[in-house]
Amino acid sequence: MPEDPAVIPVLPVTKVAGVTTGGAYELPVYPFVEPAELRGKIGRHAVVVIGAGLAGLTAACDLALHGVPAVVLDDDDTVGVRGASSRGICYAQKSLEIFRRLGIYERIAARGVSWSVGRTLAGSDEVFSFDLKSQPTFGASEQPPFINLQQFYIEWFLVDRAYELGTVDLRWKNKVIACEARRDAVVLRVETPAGHYEMETQWVIDCSGSRSPLRVLLDVPVQTEHVVDRWCISDVRFRTRPPAERWTWIHAPFNDDRAVWQHLMGDDVWRLDYQMAPDADPEQFSQPAVIADRLRRQFGPGIEYELVWVGPYSYRSQCLETFRVGRVFFAGDAAHVMSPFGARGGNSGIQDADNLVWKLALVLEGKASGRLLESYDAERRPAAQQNIRITTRTARFLSPQAPIDRLMRDAVVALAREYPFARGFVNTGRLSSPSSYVDSPLNVGKGGGRSVQNIALTLPDGKRGDLVELLEYADYCALGLITQPVDRYFAQELELLEQRYPVRFFRLQNAPAEAGAFAAVVDADERLSAELGIDGACICVLRPDLHLAGLLHEAGAPDIERALRKLFAHG
């Protein structure tokens, strides 16, 4: 994600649907409530989340769904960044499926913009394009490939959901200033408008962003790569709407032959990112008069528009050398920062929380070994490193610093103008996709580590639903999907495994009728079977984050128990 943009006030301002950020939006302001600790109450918390951003609020809501109360500490009293309109805007299918489970997807879909077409241009020549609707997996999930919406809306919806769930203690204007790690707890010192206090917690999830104080307090090593590449965001509302597609210019004649991004967001606002020259003055580049000239060059002299917000940003690549220090976990921008190309920053942080919470909840409930938590770093740090590698290649393509990189980029663009084979080498951002944990210590069989799409199903109660609802039906346990014969004795063994481990077994529709009394799940179009790669009699084990743990072909009860012991780190 880019660093927080410097805010440049812009006028005129028009209110949108009763809410207005920066010049054009009013963010909600949440009241400071004096914490119980300031009133002399001493308590020990299960989990404290630092930072009420995308990753932190996702973690807090997910913990609540798992029955784990959490305290969220945030040093501000609003969502988003005060004075900024759009930061992250593009939410990938995996994140949308997570939001479906958390209960805010419908609000996102109603406010945001779904899209599938992307075009890349060099001047007036289209050198690459795609339509996600043409992909074989399009439509398999109940959620679309992408929805664009300003980040503060997502955070706003998550805050509302946290209050609705009732077990999240949101503490605004609470700033962590010190941290003491003990053998069985973490003690945090917190600064508030009413004074300082200390609190003790079993676990900490640090989602406080790229300037995380805990990283410094705990002296966590970090690998950083600065990139000389600066951009200016211009959020604009037009009277005549451009196409609701993602357009990218590698060479834009209306931006001095530099790159430009064009995306539609919620509230009929277009996000335009203009790449600056290395020696440009960001403040001058972001002046309304300069932006007006640029818009006229791009859309024509008669363009009618409203400038909603404008601000420059730069970015860097950064990754901690460990995502866990004792009882403290790092997630989101506190763990990794990357360039924004391909929408991998915020989506990656959301998936960090999704990966961690089910493991932490099972450990707190005593249903899994504490060793299960070691898999968070083992899975999410390689995922972050992969995302950084992918986005760094895009940055080198869009802003080549070395002569060989510029030569390569120019050759690809020249060839792509004429030859289809070269268009696949055009790199303006490999779109965010769910991480695959192929080397995970939790994999138990064939195909382990793959993310599974949220397929539509008929649930055991006969109602139409999806895989996310089946997970809720199973009380967020692991899922065991049966496609092999199960006699009465085997069924009794599986029922005993359900009592010993956090897993629930279901019979897929195409499973043999002898599959005991286990409730049936109807996969009418066999999309789930295809998604899972089921090619015969097996037990399919799905993790609570809807990643495939593995396919166990013609497995007996001892095989399944060994797999569950490995999945929940009991071995």
Image (spheres, rainbow, N blue to C red):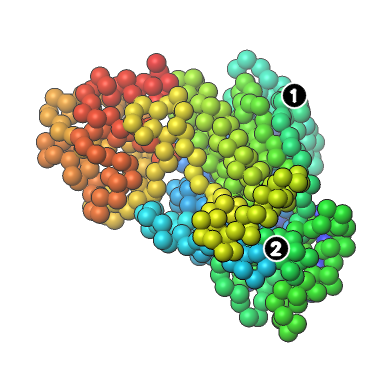
Q: Where is residue 245 in the image (x, y as percent from the top left)?
A: 56, 67
Q: Marks 2 and 1: in contact by CB < 8 Å?
A: no
Residue lying furthest bottom: 302
Q: Residues within 10 Å of mark 1 (few under 14, many from 20)?
A: few
Residue annotated with mark 2 = 251
Question: Quarter holding the C terminus?
Answer: top left
Q: Which of marks 1 and 2 is nearer the N terminus?
A: 1
Q: Residues within 10 Å of mark 2 (few under 14, many from 20)?
A: many
Residue drawn at point x = 70 percent, y = 50 percent: 407
Of residues 213 and 527, the one nearer the viewer is: 527
Q: How far apart are marks 1 and 2 (CA)?
A: 42 Å
Residue annotated with mark 1 = 219
* Amino acid type indicated by mark 2: His
Q: Position of residue 45 (x, y in %)?
A: 59, 29
Residue drawn at point x = 49 percent, y = 20 percent: 370
Residue 226 in view, yes or no:
yes
Q: How many labels does the image show?
A: 2
